[in-house]
């Protein structure tokens, strides 16, 4: 029979405050081994100390209480380890995002203006295979990856070779309202037949101010900002969707530093960038 400790001694033994122990009791996460019905005093057995230590470490790792409960209630070691591993993976992803944001912020502080040049270009009308849908801004990246993969697979299955780099056309509402029409397309020499989501489409001609964004899209807002400033400074803006052309992307290489994306803002007329 394990020895028991008062809630105060158990608190000292586990470095969990009495307030937290009472909270965990109310949640059913760590219930006392005994509760005096007259006084309400709680006592804990010494064999509950390991569970308390596990809870404390998981809380240090920001694991939600419902997940901690699931870990403690896991029927076997394998199930418990799977839950812990899943949380560690989420922490690693969060850490990677944080490190990326820190690096981008340091870069912004070092070079706030950016040095990417802006050029003018007239894009002629082209035939393309395209997928168009209304998309939420938060879903844009996975939607884009899925749509581009579907386009590539469909064209390959039909023996159609791309006639240029893939691109995207994004309505203003996608940015301003966090939901809007998005099109991903692959230029083709001839019109393709409709198949599922893949449809033939003519990408219209447009006058564009163009900037090349290097690397991943984690810091693409910097290139957008530089381009928008240029267009506004030169009073060139006209209504129309933003275009992107994916010169080198994740379908071409896993090396993010090698990725290159053209961002294109519609403008009045072509001319030398200043």
Image: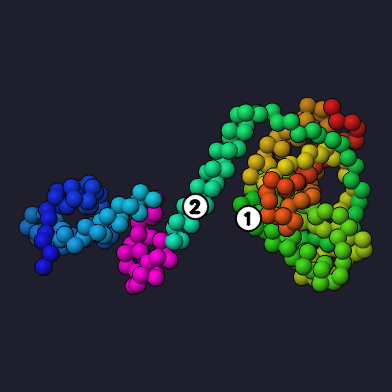
State the residue at coordinates (39%, 50%).
62
Question: Which image quarter holds the N terminus?
Answer: bottom left
Residues in magenta? Answer: 62-84
Q: Earlier in the sequence, mark 2 or mark 1?
A: 2
The label number, if any, that marks residue 92 in the structure image: 2
How many marks on residues? Answer: 2
Where residue 155 appears, as percent x and y from the top left, is 82, 67
Q: Is residue 77 magenta?
A: yes
Quadrant of the rendered image containing residue 184 = bottom right
Q: How is the image coloured?
A: rainbow
Q: On the picture, is 230 further left or further right than 36?
A: right
At horizontal 74% and vertical 31% (from top left) the residue drawn is: 115
Residue at horizontal 91 percent and vertical 51 percent from the top: 125
Viewer-proximal residue among 62 and 2: 2
On residue 182, which mark appears? Answer: none
Please give the residue where the numbered disc 1 appears in the rendered image: 139
Q: Residues within 10 Å of mark 2 (few under 14, many from 20)?
A: few
The answer to whether residue 169 is seen in the rendering is no
Residue 232 versus residue 150 in the image, above or below:
above
On the picture, is 229 further left or further right than 70?
right
In the rendering, at what x and y percent does residue 91 appear? 47, 52
Which of the two discs, 2 and 1, sits closer to the camera?
2
């Amino acid at each position: 029979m394990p020895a028991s400790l008062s809630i105060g001694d158990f608190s000292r033994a586990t470095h969990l405050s009495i307030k937290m122990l009472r909270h965990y009791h109310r949640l059913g996460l760590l219930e006392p081994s005994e509760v005096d019905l007259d006084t309400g005093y709680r006592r804990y057995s010494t064999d509950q100390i390991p569970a308390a230590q596990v809870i404390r470490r998981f809380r240090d790792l920001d694991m939600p209480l419902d997940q901690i409960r699931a870990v403690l209630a896991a029927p076997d070691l394998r199930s418990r380890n799977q839950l812990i591993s899943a949380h560690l993976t989420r922490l690693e992803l969060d850490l990677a995002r944080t490190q990326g944001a820190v690096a981008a912020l340091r870069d912004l502080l070092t070079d706030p203006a950016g040095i990417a040049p802006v050029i003018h270009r007239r894009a002629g009308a082209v035939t393309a295979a395209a997928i168009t849908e209304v998309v939420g801004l938060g879903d844009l990246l996975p939607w884009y990856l899925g749509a581009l993969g579907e386009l590539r697979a469909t064209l390959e299955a039909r023996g159609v070779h791309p006639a240029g780099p893939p691109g995207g056309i994004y309505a203003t509402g996608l940015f301003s309202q966090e939901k809007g029409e998005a099109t991903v397309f692959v230029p083709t020499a001839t019109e393709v037949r409709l198949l599922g989501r893949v449809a033939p489409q003519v990408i219209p001609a447009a006058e564009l101010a163009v900037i090349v964004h290097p690397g991943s899209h984690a810091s693409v807002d910097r290139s957008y900002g530089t381009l928008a400033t240029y267009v506004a400074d030169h009073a060139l803006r006209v209504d129309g969707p933003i275009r992107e052309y994916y010169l080198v992307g994740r379908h071409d290489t896993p090396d993010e530093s090698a990725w290159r994306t053209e961002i294109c803002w519609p403008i009045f007329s072509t001319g030398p960038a200043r």
